[in-house]
Image: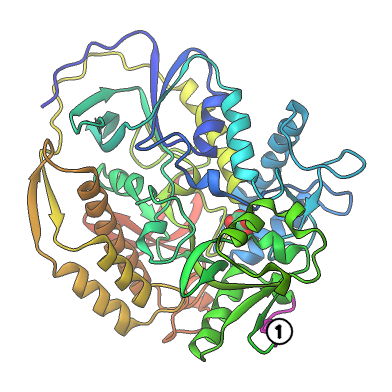
Amino acid sequence: MTGGVIVSSIKKVIVVGSGIAALSFAKTISENCQVIMMTKKQFSSSNSMLAQGGIAAAFSAHDSVDQHVQDTLAAGCDHNDDKTVQEIVGFGKHLVQQLVAEGCPFDRNEAGMPQLGKEGAHTSNRILHAGGDQTGKTLVQFLKSQLGSHIHLCEYHHVIDLLVHEGKCVGVVWKDEKGHVHTMTADAVVLSTGGCGSLYETNTNDPSVTGDGLMMAHRAGAQLVDLEFVQFHPTLLTIAGKAVGLVSEAVRGEGAYLEDETGRRIMKGIHPQVDLAPRDVVARAIFHEQQLGHHLYLNIHDIPHFSVRFPAIDAMCQRAGVHMASGRLPVSPGMHFLMGGIKVNEHGETTVQSLFAIGEAACTGLHGANRLASNSLLEGLVLGRKAARRIEQLPKLQKTIPSLSIKEVWSVPTISEAQIRKKMTAYAAIVRDEKGLQTLLDELEQVSFQQINVKDITNEQIELSNQWALAICLVKSALLRTESRGGHYRMDYPKRNDALWRGKQIVHEKGHIHIMKNERIGAEWNVYS
Ligand code: SIN
């Protein structure tokens, strides 16, 4: 039990995570709020820091917000929320313009204007980069430099659960570096904890991204949606069967192409956008070729000054011993991004009062079934800002919160992280079918548990519990969706089935799964089954 709390007059907000969305929130929120930004590792341990590819915004004279919206919808396979797409793409452009005006060091052309690159499924050059292939890191550092003294960064503060009182989120439970358990109350909690790359053997995510935010929200009673839509990035540098790191899609945007060991271009004839087809299409094509025994390479011969344009990728290749003069980088796909997440409205509000989610942890409906490249930093910027504005309008906690009970005993599954990853990679990755998914679900559900007191549980055991529970939710969603759409490809249902599935989302509530029609009329969702 945690003791009663006398509420101070200052509005207090806890942000969990330290990526772009969290920083956009922190940059925006008024000085009348005290923000405690907790991150379980170092400040720099986030997916945003690793983002090579940039931030999409319709800056070119030949481009428009409307065209960016159309590309987002086409890549998302008609599973996006149209209104959200309009809002984020339009407002996002404004926020990027603001960053340019504030001096964010985006790469510029000879005329001093932001240089615009291309990535998969974009019909125009509209990707801003910084530091060549270090956009995320540059943006994180720039936003951090803009934070006021009302933002308190707390590294190695591992938030393990949420405090809920009368259906409202009133704070967090966290562990310090020594493993001691603490609670902290707040007027609002914002989850910016990323997705769940760690569920797969090969992924591009920071190792700290273990689905914690999603499962904390789930335990608190918030709805999760669209978990079956998992994006695999087509090109991870792969040496002796092991992925070493991401090779940005911007490399294909500059003219690189995929070929097999004989030099055959594998994307020819597969999609009109060839090597710049949507990511799900390219990842499946590579997977198919690998199943046939081929080895895949990114041919970078046509890119002049590769090491200048892509310094971090070049350095990674050198470290990995790639013979750069060959002009071929060995690649294979890896888990990159979760389109689904904690269901939120346009302000980042979850279905639990005073609990917000932003960034990859949230599902706004922007990405649909397959995210358009470089739309995620944009979404983080917009949603961070909108959540901050919303929280400023919330009333302060007025009364003393009574004693709150915390989850004292945790059930930790007797399965290793490596075993979960192996099974997820085998049965719930780029292609799936009922037999494999059902086998996986049975194996996950048949594990036994150790009961461990919260005082004794390790960070790794908490992450493992979250990963196991999230894997089950993801697999159940993948089993239910009997069609193929975007990042969810079912070999036994290889076609899109609009008659049955268009606009429907699979929604997880504590103890229930619903298939809902996403009509998004105000906050109303119609439950169909
Ligand atoms: C990339 O650089 O290819 C990744 C960009 C993104 O995921 O949006």
**Dividing the image into 4 quarters, which one contains the C terminus?**
bottom left
Q: Can residue 111 be seen in this view?
A: yes
Q: Which residue lies furthest to the right in this view?
A: 111
Where is residue 167 shown, x and y percent of the image?
A: 25, 35
SS for callout 1: loop
Q: 353 or 443: nearer the eye?
A: 443
Q: 371 or 145: nearer the eye?
A: 145
- Residue type marked 1: Arg
Residue at 22% of width from left, 26% of height from top? 183
Where is residue 280 shown, x and y percent of the image?
A: 56, 71
Q: Is residue 294 left or right of residue 476?
A: right
Q: Can residue 372 be seen in this view?
A: no
Magenta stretch bounds:
263-272
Residue at 13% of width from left, 31% of height from top? 405
Quadrant observed for ligand 1 in the rendered image: bottom right
Q: Is residue 456 above or below residue 119?
A: above
Where is residue 520 shown, x and y percent of the image?
A: 50, 51
Q: Residue furthest top?
A: 9
Quarter-of-image position of residue 105: top right
Q: Is residue 221 left or right of residue 432?
A: left
* Magenta residues, dominant SS class: loop
Q: 527 or 108: nearer the eye?
A: 108
Q: In this view, does 125 lie above or below 361?
A: below
Whether residue 195 appears in magenta in the rendering, the answer is no
Which color mode does the image show? rainbow
Ligand 1 has an atom within 8 Å of the beta carbon of the residue at disc 1 = no
Residue at 72% of width from left, 41% of height from top? 93
Q: 237 or 334: nearer the eye?
A: 237
- Residue under numbered circle 1: 265
**Dividing the image into 4 quarters, which one contains the N terminus?**
top left
